[in-house]
Image: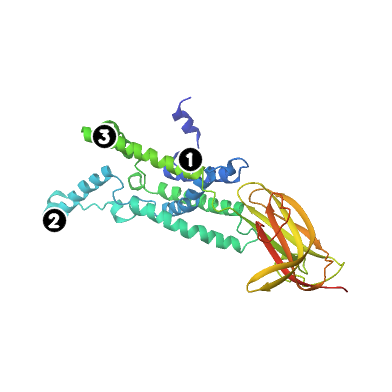
Amino acid sequence: MSDGTLRLLLPRFLRRFPADLAAIVLLVLATGVATLAPVISETPLRVVLGLAFALFAPGYAFIAALFPERGPAFGGASASADEDDHSGSNLVEQDGSADANTGLTERVDPRRAGGIDGIERVALSFGLSIAITPLIGLILNFTPFGIRLVPIVLSIGGFTLLASAVAALRRQELPVEERFEVPYRAWVGAARAELFEPETRLDAVLNVVLVVSLLLAVSSVGYAVMVPKSGESFSEFYLLTENESGALVADDYPQNFTVGQGQPLTVGIGNHEHEQVEYSVVAELQRVSIRNNSTTVRERQELDRFSRTVPANESVNWTHDVTPSMTGERLRLVYLLYRGSPPAEPTVENAYRETHLWVNVSSQ
């Protein structure tokens, strides 16, 4: 069965669907798969398609719906044709007697009377996409769905598909010669002639340089996408408490303790080291003296030590019950974080990270 016969099996609307809008529809469907499919969503393809999906597709479909007609001279061949047509009409305008004698009437080119040219169409596509995408996000923010991945993809994709369908219908209502059409064949023919049929040896050399430059540019972009910079490596280390509603907050820490009576604190670690890390934590209660911005530990009590393995880009929280046996005012409850095992004598100076509270401990 030939391609022509297969094409006839499609509904008439699909057979007449413009090629540029069909490419937009395919981009929407491919982005949905690359974003939501379990395995493909973890590849750089999601980023590449997502950028075009969010920053170009909705604006292009919307512009296509607003301006279904041809604009001024989209390609070189069209430009010369336009110039020939308009030169004839200009001659008609200058010679009024010619109209009377020959019966010629002034012809208005629909591509000049309305529509936009290719550069304007592309520029407006980016500009409107940048406006439409945040607007859809703002609307989603006031719905039960919220600004999440699936609602955003479905909303932007649905808007783009609807605008593409409207654009296709509006184009079909116009005469064939007035419809907007991207001159793919003219571009391909011109590119083939320039690359494979150069007029001079200099043109051939320039073509080779152009092809090599394009390959280098594409390779550079592909490498940047496939091997992104890891960024700064660091670990978060923090203390949290539980409020009345049961939520963990960095506020309202306990300040007064009693010997032998425990109070809970939540210790948290966020791993942004771009690799799995085994952390160790040492909790101490210290009696310190501060003089001339120098802190000296006079007495210390180790409360606990524990280890946690945290995967890359993940966080863990666990509750530590603080039960002091040392009394005094302005004691330092300090938590020391280490990558790997802690040293024999853990201190604030040799810790990877540290966080502390100032507490009072009474005997009763």
Question: Considering only order in the chain, which callout, 2 or 3, is on the residue closer to the N terminus?
Answer: 2
Determine which residue is flagged by label 1: 14
Asked if residue 22 can be seen in this view, the reply is no
Residue at the far top: name it: 1
Whole-number angstrom distance, CA of label 2 to CA of label 1: 46 Å
Secondary structure, mark 1, is helix
Whole-number angstrom distance, CA of label 1 to CA of label 3: 43 Å
Image height check: is 1 above or below 191?
above
Amino acid under disc 3: Val
x and y percentages locating residue 128 in the rendered image: 44, 58
Secondary structure, mark 3, is helix
Image height check: is 41 above or below 293?
above
Whole-number angstrom distance, CA of label 3 to CA of label 2: 47 Å
Which of the labelled discs sits on residue 94, or is there none? Answer: 2
Observer-nearest residue: 214 or 140?
Answer: 214
Foreground mark, 3 or 2, reads 3
x and y percentages locating residue 24 in the rendered image: 47, 46
* Residue at 62% across, 59% down: 146
